[in-house]
Amino acid sequence: MLNVVSHTPTETELLTKLIEDLNWVDVGRKYISKDKKLYSWWSYRNKDWKKSNRGRRLDHIWVSKDLDSKLKSFLSCKDIRDWEKPSDHVPLILELST
């Protein structure tokens, strides 16, 4: 995805630096490894979004390190993309323990 808007080397390097400098935890990647796709957006132009599974990771949940131990679960609601007239983005849900 490099060199695509929102994924250029400059943007990805600055975002990575920001995450590291602020000591944030990438919740999605805590639950879904980097070798797996973690998209939150699929184009309406693609008639069979599941088959091609070519999307983008445009939505994120990051938490401070203080909340890392409170992380209980993460869910990307991909199935919502099959609803009638859905958004091109799917909800991401984070559950924290008390």
Image: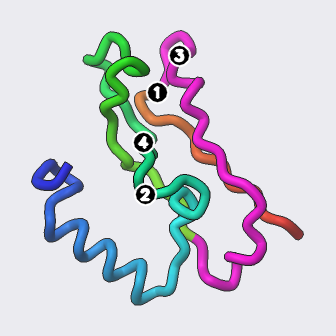
Residue under label 3: 82
In the image, the segment drawn in magenta is: 63-86
Q: Nearer the viewer, mark 2 or mark 4?
A: 2
Q: Nearer the viewer, mark 1 or mark 2?
A: 2
Residue under label 4: 39
Which of disc 1 and disc 4 is earlier in sequence?
4
Relative to residue 58, is residue 61 depicted above or below? below
Residue plotted at (56% across, 15% down): 83
Relative to residue 71, is residue 21 depicted above or below? below
Quadrant of image for the C terminus: bottom right
Tell me the element at label 4.
loop
- Percent across and percent down for residue 69 are 75, 77
Task: Report whether 96 appears left or right of 49.
Answer: right
Q: Amino acid at mark 1?
A: Ser
Image marks 4 and 1: residues in contact by CB distance under 8 Å: no
Residue under label 1: 87
Residue plotted at (31% across, 31% down): 54
Circle 3: is it few (<14), some (14-19), or many (20+) Cα within 10 Å? few
